[in-house]
Image (cartoon, rainbow, N blue to C red):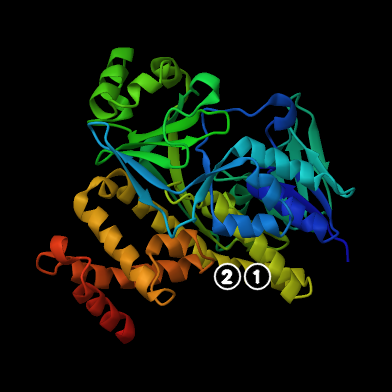
Amino acid sequence: MQKSITIVGAGLVGSMLACYLSKRGHKVNVYERRPDMRKAGYIGGRSINLALSYRGWKALSKIGLDKAVTEMAIPMHGRMIHDLNGNTQLTPYGKEGQAIFSVSRGDLNRLMVEEAEKFKDVHFYFDHRCTGVDFDKSNLSFEKPDGENVAVKNTDIIFGADGAFSEVRYKMQITPNFNLHQQYEPYAYKELHIPPGEGGKHLMEKNALHIWPRGNFMMIALPNLDGSFTVTLFAPMEGENSFGSLKTDADVTAFFKKHFPDSLPLMPELTKTFNENPTSSLVTIRCFPWVYKNAALIGDAAHAIVPFYGQGMICGFEDVKELDEILDATNEDWPMALDKYQHQRKPNGDAILELALHNYIEMRDLSGRKDFQLRTQIEKRIAEKFSPRFMTHYSMVVFSDLSYNEAKLRGEKQNELLDKIMAMPNIEQIWESEKVLKVAEEWINAN
């Protein structure tokens, strides 16, 4: 039976949800506070490039967009670590041929909006800011830039897909027994840019995610199709080596010359871009319940996370895919389906939130340390020998559809084995020996 569904938010998750629901035959109206990116263009400076991986591809394939997205994506086969002297070392992400993919947020969003609009019962309304939700009557109100108010009445289902600062979630906060934990991290990010070389050539290795790990701060760079790289600096808000300490152009130039010397010649407009682009905060959101009456939260509105596992968008996509599967399993019994959805996805949203926070430490600090690099090599060797009983923690999260919660628990358990092996005498010399594999096999058989 066709439902009238209102989605607040036409970002990546909202537009994907529109695609899924339209394919189910529902009438879908999507309201977005920002202008139509197809007319106004994509507004940069606040976005971290997207890293698309296995779970995301599965969600895209169910609506037939995987091939189209492949054409706009660049495979990244590993982390390219840059040391202080400009030396680089590539650490593969997984098995040979495995990669995560750099893709433009704006291009992907545009593609999904256009796909959803192919259905006659799907409509997008841009420049509509949500100003109110009446959960009892299933009514919503929106305001346009000219001050005009728009009322949406008697919608069957409401989805809040309006991001970390969701208006729908804000209205849910005053409903009974709603729990919310919001935390701003003590570090921030700023988007920078490496332009293409002559003839659109990439000036660094194209098929890698570049990382400059520097302890309590770092810089990353992801490739774009035009030969450029989107660069993001992550650093504390205040204190030593912080955004607060970079007050002048001379400060910025000296900071990059000291900590990222090989990148400086690649960014001829560094200070201009640094001054023009905002310093943006990072926030995590935990909340529950995600469902109230006929309204549900999805994506960042339900579980905003930091970007350091490249799973924020992916987790939202998986929300949509699993909701679709639950609707099939419940024969579209919407109250039952929404309740099952929130209880099934909540533990996974919490798990990837914690994993992403920890991965920042790994990227900014551990990835540049010899002992951690050795630990990673040992973990991969064990995985190659004993897969699928043992997988690397990264592969469980990025190259499988094992639930995030299960991946977190298994990763924590496997750390016991890796700690034991790293404590073995002369591990630097014997890590490739059969003795190490024997220890691993005994542990795997016992667990």
- Can you say which quadrant of the picture contains the C terminus? bottom left
Q: Which residue does the numbered mark 2 point to in the structure image?
A: 343
Residue shown at 22% from the left, 75% from the top:
434
Q: Is residue 228 left or right of residue 106?
A: left
For badge 2, the amino acid type reads His
How many residues crowd around disc 1 within 10 Å: few (fewer than 14), some, or many (20 or more)? some
In the displayed structure, does residue 352 sit left or right of residue 33?
left
Check if mark 2's residue and mark 1's residue have beta carbons within 8 Å.
yes
Task: Evaluate whether residue 447 shows in this view.
Answer: no
Q: Position of residue 271 (x, y in %)?
A: 39, 16
- Residue nearer the viewer, 313 or 148: 313
Q: Looking at the rendered structure, which numbered label has been put on residue 339? A: 1
Quarter-wise, where is residue 213 in the image? top left
Cα separation, mark 2 vs mark 1, equals 6 Å
Residue drawn 72% across the image and 41% down it: 111
Q: Describe residue 303's horizontal placement relative to residue 293 as left or right.
A: left
Q: Secondary structure at mark 2?
A: helix
Mark 1: which secondary structure? helix
